[in-house]
Amino acid sequence: MADDIRRNMPLFPIGIVMKLTGLSARQIRYYEQHELVKPARTKGNQRLFSLNDIDRLLEIKSLIEQGVNIAGIKKMLAMKEAGKPSPEAATEPKAEPKRKELTEKELHELLKQQVLLHRPGQAATLIQGELSRFFH
DNA sequence: TTTCTGACA
DNA sequence: TGTCAGAA
């Protein structure tokens, strides 16, 4: 839908994003340096984030809390975008459930990778605990 | 006032 | 990551 343009419309300065995501300006800028997010800029070089950027940052925050490093997060975000390249375009009557479904499936994949990739011993249980809410 | 970049305890 | 400086 034309809803995407609104989702991608740069609207909020870093101050708002801080409150919305709970992340510090330092973190947000750091993530940007590592290309986890690419906010637009105003003429005065101020960062402007879109709703999509906010969602992205929330996911990054979630992964950080789970102990995932920048490289790992980058890979996950890359995956998420890989299956995205606009599957639909014209008249799309129904599209709501697709978003959540895809995210959930990817989360399972990503987490599986995490368990395999990171700390073979203890961290797995912590990750599983965090994931419990995704296993219906 | 808010945000930006760069740098360091 | 937090925080300070100096400039927009």
Image (spheres, coloured by chain):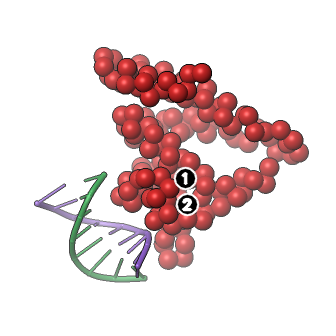
Chain colours: A red, B purple, C green
Q: Residue at x 78, y 39 (%)?
A: A95
Q: Position of residue A33 (x, y in %)?
A: 41, 54
> Looking at the picture, which amino acid does disc 1 mark?
Ile
| Position of the C terminus of chain A by quadrant | top right
Q: Is residue A113 visible?
A: no
Q: Chain of mark 1?
A: A
Asked if the residue at tag 1 contacts the one at tag 2, i.e. Cβ–Cβ closer than 8 Å, the answer is yes
| Circle 1 residues within 10 Å: few <14, some 14–19, many ≥20 | many
Q: Position of residue C5 (x, y in %)?
A: 22, 76
**What residue sits right under mark 1 in the picture?**
A54
**A83 above or below A52?**
above
> Looking at the picture, which amino acid does disc 2 mark?
Phe
Q: Position of residue A98 (x, y in %)?
A: 72, 34
Q: Residue at x 53, y 39 (%)?
A: A77
**A40 above or below A106?**
below
Could you give the CA–CA distance between mark 2 and mark 1, rounded to whole angstroms? 7 Å
> Which badge, 2 or 1, comes first in the chain's sequence?
2
Q: Residue at x 79, y 54 (%)?
A: A2
**What residue sits right under mark 2 in the picture?**
A49
Q: Chain of mark 2?
A: A
| Circle 2 residues within 10 Å: few <14, some 14–19, many ≥20 | many
Q: Position of residue A109 (x, y in %)?
A: 54, 24
Judged from the image, the secondary structure of the residue bearing numbered disc 1 is helix
Q: Residue at x 55, y 65 (%)?
A: A12
Judged from the image, the secondary structure of the residue bearing numbered disc 2 is loop
A122 vs A112, left or right, is: left
Q: Is residue A129 visible?
A: yes
Mark seen at residue A25: none
Choose between A103 and A135: the one closer to the eye: A135
